[in-house]
Amino acid sequence: KAGVTQTPRYLIKTRGQQVTLSCSPISGHRSVSWYQQTPGQGLQFLFEYFSETQRNKGNFPGRFSGRQFSNSRSEMNVSTLELGDSALYLCASSRGDISYEQYFGPGTRLTVT
Amino acid sequence: AQTVTQSQPEMSVQEAETVTLSCTYDTSENNYYLFWYKQPPSRQMILVIRQEAYKQQNATENRFSVNFQKAAKSFSLKISDSQLGDTAMYFCAFMLVMIKAAGNKLTFGGGTRVLVKP
């Protein structure tokens, strides 16, 4: 079974721009979660989508948004990029019921200049 | 809110020896899961082992085992017969078991860097 895929793997953007990251979950998984990893703040939960609905949200500003499509693929968008948004963005998929195992993708490394 | 603390920023171990990583967590809830994830230099986060809070028996996965002390809110990871490929960041993570509609969320500790020396 193919794992979680994320595109693009690397991205360089300028302050003020917006960016969209994509995540394709493991086949059959209906839940997709997003995490931000930075050296200063560590791993922080952004949000989770299940069956095209946001089920849970972390403590991030409204510039961070996401969506999920009917095939369970998910995108996250960051608008008006700031230097502090430079991070590794990790996507994780799970079956979506109260099953607890989350499987992570390789991440997208975003650099904001 | 739940918090997870890993007090050892870095540890080194000789190949074939054993190393134990510490993790403590804080929660007022009773039903939760605990995990250890490994993040090698490739940055791919890999699930190492999981523990359900309602289970008294400690989880074991090949060379990896945990010591789960629920009353003390402690969840340590033991890596036996350490191999060079075990060199990585290790993260302890907590997930509250909630009703389906409330979703799932992992809360991570700050990580412990493990270096296995030949």
Image: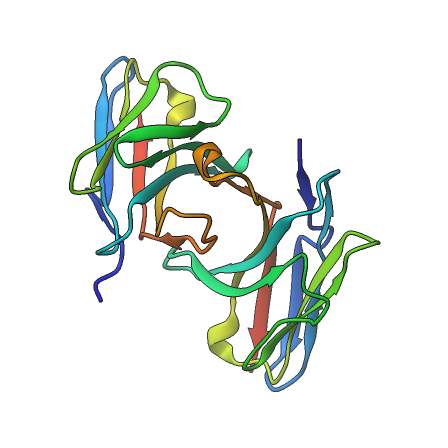
User: Which of the two residues, A10 or A56, is positioned nearer the viewer here?
Assistant: A56
Quarter of the N terminus of chain B within the rendering: top right
Q: Residue at x 30, y 34 (%)?
A: A110
Residue A85 in the image, given as x and y percentages of width and height: 39, 25
Q: Residue at x 46, y 62 (%)?
A: B47
Going by the picture, which residue comes out furthest to the right?
B72
Q: Residue at x 51, y 58 (%)?
A: B37
Horizontal relation, residue B3 to residue A17: left or right: right
User: Which of the two residues, B111 or B108, is positioned nearer the viewer here?
Assistant: B108
Quarter of the C terminus of chain B within the rendering: bottom right
Q: How is the image coloured?
A: rainbow
User: Which of the two residues, A50 or A89, is positioned nearer the viewer here?
Assistant: A50
Horizontal relation, residue B86 to residue B68: left or right: left
Residue A91 in the image, given as x and y percentages of width and height: 34, 44
Image height check: is B101 above or below A107?
A: above
Image height check: is A89 above or below B71?
A: above
